Amino acid sequence: MRRLADLGSPARHWLAIGGMTFTLLAGSALAEWRDEHAILINTTQSLPEWAFFIDKGRLPQRGDLVVFAPPDTSLVRAHFGRSPAPFAKRVLGMPGDMVVHRGQTVLVGGVPVARMKPQTTRGETLTPGPTGRVPQGCYYAGTAHEDGFDSRYAEIGFVCREHIIGSGDTTL
């Protein structure tokens, strides 16, 4: 096998051009992937997974993760700051599904999906979320976690298309 140092000057020149071309093409492909995808690290107890791959252009289906910019509400600001990280929840209700509150239980399409609490763990009042048909372009997003901060509360409400960053899959 020949060593790089044993190659003539033209061969080393073409090898360097080939290496640079490969590096530029790989970098371009990575930049294109980055523009259409993201990796989200979960820092909450809301969902059991620790990380997600996000497809920025894909709208969610039932059961998918939906990643969205949370609404600018006083409770979101109090718990997550003025520029909160995106939220990731499961899509439990699709456009047209009926959301009903039966006592503290939230049902979507007749299936219990969550229990509401009257207050946060800090004692702030929580307002029950929207009921009725999930509007077109919107989703009921939630989690099974008892302290989940999601569509079960008006402070989050339905997650609508203009706030959706993308849909995701777990890394594991």
Image (spheres, grey):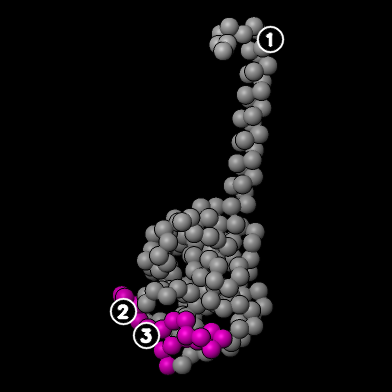
Taking the image as shown, residue 93 lies to the left or right of residue 120, namely right
Q: Earlier in the sequence, mark 2 or mark 3?
A: 3
Residue at the image point whose x is 66% and y is 20% from the top:
17
Closest to the camera, between mark 1 and mark 2, is 1
Q: Nearer the viewer, residue 78 or 7?
A: 7
Q: How far apart, in angstroms, are the residues tagged by discs 3 and 1?
A: 76 Å
The residues colored magenta run 103-124
Q: Badge 1 is on which residue?
A: 10
> Any magenta on residue 62?
no
Residue at the image point whose x is 37% and y is 77% from the top:
146
Q: Earlier in the sequence, mark 3 or mark 1?
A: 1
Q: Position of residue 125 (x, y in %)?
A: 37, 82
Q: Amino acid at mark 1?
A: Pro
Q: Which mark is residue 123?
A: 2
Judge whether 165 appears above or below 75 on screen: above
Residue at the image point whose x is 56% and y is 8% from the top:
5
Q: Nearer the viewer, residue 28 or 160?
A: 28
Secondary structure of residue under mark 3: loop
- The crowding category of the residue bearing disc 1, from other C-alpha atoms within 10 Å (few below 14, some 14 to 19, many at least 20), is few
**Are dots 2 and 3 in contact, CB under 8 Å?**
no
Q: How far apart, in angstroms, are the residues tagged by discs 2 and 3?
A: 9 Å
Taking the image as shown, residue 2 lies to the left or right of residue 41, namely right
One can see residue 89 in this view? yes
